[in-house]
Amino acid sequence: MTAELVRGQNHPLPETRLEIRVSAGHPVLVGATLGDEQGRVAGAEWIAHPGAPALPGVGVPGPAAADHRLAVDLDAVPDAVHRVSVLLALTGGAARFGALAAPFVAVAGPDGTEIASYTLTGLDRESAVVALELYRRQGAWKVRAMGQGYEGGLADLLGDQGLERPADLAAAILATATPEAPEADPSSTVPSRVPEPEHVPRTAPATPPPTPATGIGTGGPLDYSHPRRRTAPAPAPEPRQAPPVPVAGDASGWSMDERLYNQVWGMFEDLARTAAAYRSACDFAESRLDRELDETLTDYRARADGANDAARAAARARHDELVERAREVLDRDLAQLAAESEVVEPALPVAYARWDNPVWHSYRVPAEEPMAVRLGDLHLPERTDLRIPMLVRLPLERGLWVDSGRGHSEAAGLLDEVELRRLALDCAVAHAARLLAAHPAGGFTVHVVDPAGAGAAALAPLVETGAAAPPARGAAGVSAVLEQLTERVDLLQMAVRGGAADALPPGLDAARQLLIVHDFPHGFDDRAVTRLRYLADEGPSVGVHLLMVAAREDAAAYGPLLDPLWRSLLRLTPVPDDHLADPWVGHAWSYEPPLLPPGSVVLRQVLTQVAAARHGKQL
């Protein structure tokens, strides 16, 4: 049975020898790009387009036409290639897809049976679009319906994939789209062996797939039927292969930590797109049901004989069937991701692990800084128990803000103000402990300002273990710490810009600096606020970072003056809240802070080791 995909939905590919079928109703240019895990294309030689040599595993598309057949052999694709993107571009007089019939794209197996199809609806002013993406995941290949359009045309599409001089490249490709001779059989354009770039491993050439029985280019009658409409039943598909068994660290990378980091991000992206596909299918089912119900109401002639009731019942049945099918696909993908999470979570290193992971009990101060640290978990309402680690790259590119205000969280409304502020500072201490634990001995220094001394109890683990100096108190203490760090930022920036890093004072602490600010804006005058904003903007580039524990409403007296400060920081919450969005589809993810298990002494044990290692280094 063919899987009819909606935008963002993915589907496993039981075959590796495939045929991509395009039916557009208007001449379009078809091409394919071979990219890495991030979708970046190494160069123009990795674009399959009319007139170009065949790439390993990808045939040469024909000139611009209304119908295309593109042969793909994923077994012959180089190991460095993780994504094969199928693109469509308008040529000639057509200026935008919105003025034409929606293109239809299908993926078929070697026997001609369609595996998945996608109708590119919703396009408007775009003149180029990434229609499908074949991507490698856990050693297996999947297809994803993309529908990513570009108003700037093929040039913007190629530029988005990391290619240099995309405008010139797009012009050269479009110039090959117009046929100079009678159109050849698109099905005859099969992969062949050509010289490959030196940096990509060589692989065997693809085996030509069987010629489809359409008669195109063979002298037989032309077949004008739509690829989805069959007059005879399709051959029975082969039994579906079992999903691949999840393995921890199966992503690319030079080290296990890098592979696990990339695998977690892959799970994050898969869950985002899977949920987006399910929601899109449900929205489509609802809109179609509303339209069909409206149509039954306008047919007044059918009211008397009860035909309207039958039509409404049929419309609801179609709606329920579509939602049920979407739910089946969602449940299948969620089950696979849950199985992967069960394997990955216990294998995570200290920097990526939850506080209740046993790996913390064998903690040792690392010899080098990891790629990232875990600052909490993320989940979606489709399955709240499936949680993705929120990994933030090191060094931090922006400061952190633990919001001690109520915001819009229901959980925050159940706590009184004092308890919420205490919980926020506990979270900040846990974040600071993770950052300290992730760096080598002496590689990270923590400063604390607590003007009124209200956070003494929560800050005790940092101070009593010696991992951080006692907090600065009062307006004078706040001013002294801010002045010290501001001078440090100025000095390092001048050294970097002047190329005189070796001329820094010999006593300068080379460690990264973290300033924990509690009870803001108490104890801050206008000069201190200005310095704080300066540190937030300029500090991260030279290793000086902020960790604010504050409620935005407490600083309302400053008006919009502090808006840039809040926007420059990554907002975290001490209670679950749905305020973070992913970079792919923009879902509102529920964030859960990394709280320690009740009664746990892991945090103090870790901080004690951090302080001891620093003391030993200074000796």
Image (spheres, rainbow, N blue to C red):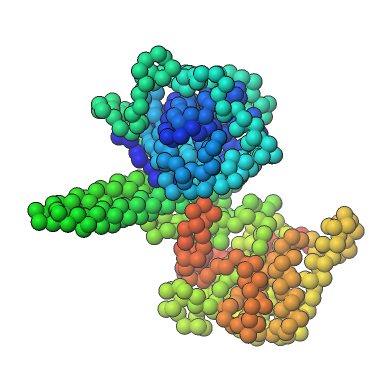
- Is residue 344 in view from this perspective? no
Q: Where residue 71 sits: x, y (%)?
A: 47, 25
Is 594 or 93 nearer to us in this picture?
Answer: 93
- Is residue 114 in view from this perspective? yes
**Residue 133 to residue 286: above or below:** above
Q: Where residue 203 sits: x, y (%)?
A: 57, 23
Is 151 or 147 nearer to us in this picture?
Answer: 151
Question: Is 496 on the left or on the right of 468, as rendered?
Answer: right
Query: Which residue lies at the image location 42% right of the left edge and 41% below the top edge?
Result: 102
**Residue 181 to residue 20: above or below:** above
Which quarter shows the C terminus? bottom right
Question: Is 215 on the left or on the right of 508, as rendered?
Answer: left
Is 167 or 299 nearer to us in this picture?
Answer: 299
**Residue 108 to residue 394: above or below:** above
Q: Where residue 197 sits: x, y (%)?
A: 66, 26
Q: Quadrant of residue 529?
A: bottom right
Is 523 or 56 nearer to us in this picture?
Answer: 56
Which quarter shows the N terminus? top left
Question: Is 8 on the left or on the right of 429, as rendered?
Answer: left
